Amino acid sequence: MPGLPTKFNFWQRLKIARRSLLFVVGYCLVLSTTLLSCNASSNNTQQQVAAPSNAAKQVVRIVRSKQLSALAVLEKQGNLEKRLELLGFKVEWPEFAAGPQQLEALNANGLDIASTAESPPIFAQAAGTPLVYLATTSFSGKAVSLLVPTNSPVKAIADLKGKKVAFQKASIGHYLLVKALESVGLKLSDVQSVFLPPPDANVAFSQGKVDGWFIWEPFVTRAEQKKVGRVLVDGGNLRDTGNFYSTTKQFYQAHPDVIKAFLEELEKADLWTKEHREEVAQLLAPVTQLDVPTLEIMHAKYDYGLRPITEQVIAKQQEVADKWYSLGQIPKKVNVRDGFLTPEEYAKITPSDVLAKK
């Protein structure tokens, strides 16, 4: 009998040991699961923390250009994206039919930086758009032309009297048609104005539904290559203003650093475009749908480089605004100076080499 307690203790200890082992194994499993869960939760938390940094990146929307321009080169080179990424922005390039549509989008917060001729900003100001003129360009008048069908009997501008002429309302085509008609003693009312955006005008012209079309490149060269149109006159001796880059007052006030970066990179692209005719042609052939040799020839139609905003630029823009008002094309007299900055404000955003051109 004295050995029973010893045997009993042995089996009791064995049972306790087994229970302890099961407990340890179970505990380890629970601990392992918990650690894995915590690790997964931690990863998810890190991903959730990282995601907002991408989602929070602001967007600047700059109009896409399909012309043989520095703006088109700027998009293709990608240098602006790299620069603005450092400022917490990514770039989008929405496309519009023409300048008036751009400024409608600008006013509706669908675009941040526009590139138009002289007239769209005036029509936009007349409609109450709070725009800001950022910079201007050389004239590049030869890149805009009045087309007539290849076999048209029209041989001179005066022959257009009573004819149908298509153009985008409030565009450079509209403005240069006025100037072309005035050069031969005619008025806008002496022709039948057909207001069509470029894609629709292209169809109407190709189908012979209009007698003339005032339009810019690359539509002009495409029409010539397809032998559906010929140039009656180009804007070389007609155009007296450059294009304008513009934004809204709200965007300018909120992001002058973005605008400064944009103008600096644009000027670099302008200078590169001027000196690299063949490379530009290769870069933009898919965009313009024209072959490289043709684009190299077209290159000569353009003047490159930004120009500073000066009193002379402002005064000329006011002349254009007064012209549109006198023709009854805008509902009220526009003071274009409302859209221009002070010289001190321009000095802060304009590239130094552009300011030196004054």
Image (cartoon, helix red, strand yellow):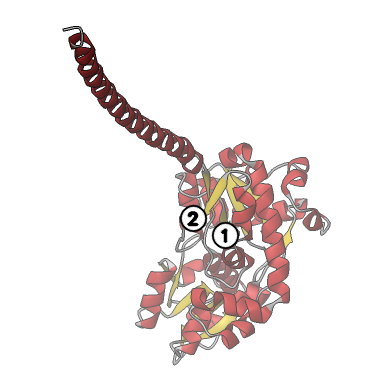
| Residue at x 21%, y 20% (from the top left corner) | 15
| Residue at x 65%, y 82% (from the top left corner) | 278
- x and y percentages locating residue 266 in the rendered image: 67, 60
Earlier in the chain: of badge 1 and badge 2, it is 2
| Residue at x 60%, y 75% (from the top left corner) | 143
| Farthest residue, direction bottom | 151
Q: Is residue 1 above or below residue 322?
A: above
Report, in whole angstroms, how far the alpha carbon at label 1 lies from the one at label 2.
8 Å
Q: Is residue 314 left or right of residue 131?
A: right
Q: Quadrant of residue 23?
A: top left
Residue where numbered disc 1 is placed: 116
Q: Quadrant of residue 48?
A: top left
| Residue at x 67%, y 50% (from the top left corner) | 261
Front-lying residue, 167 or 20: 20
Q: Is residue 32 above or below residue 276?
A: above
Q: Is residue 297 left or right of residue 29?
A: right
**Number of the label disc, if any, that sits on residue 291:** none
Label 2 near label 1: C-beta < 8 Å? Answer: yes
The amino acid pointed to by label 2 is Gln
Q: Is residue 145 left or right of residue 192?
A: right
- x and y percentages locating residue 215 in the rendered image: 51, 73
- Residue 44 visible (yes or no): yes
Q: Quadrant of the N terminus?
A: top left
The amino acid pointed to by label 1 is Thr
Which type of secondary structure does the marked residue at label 1 adopt? strand
Which type of secondary structure does the marked residue at label 2 adopt? helix
Residue where numbered disc 2 is placed: 102
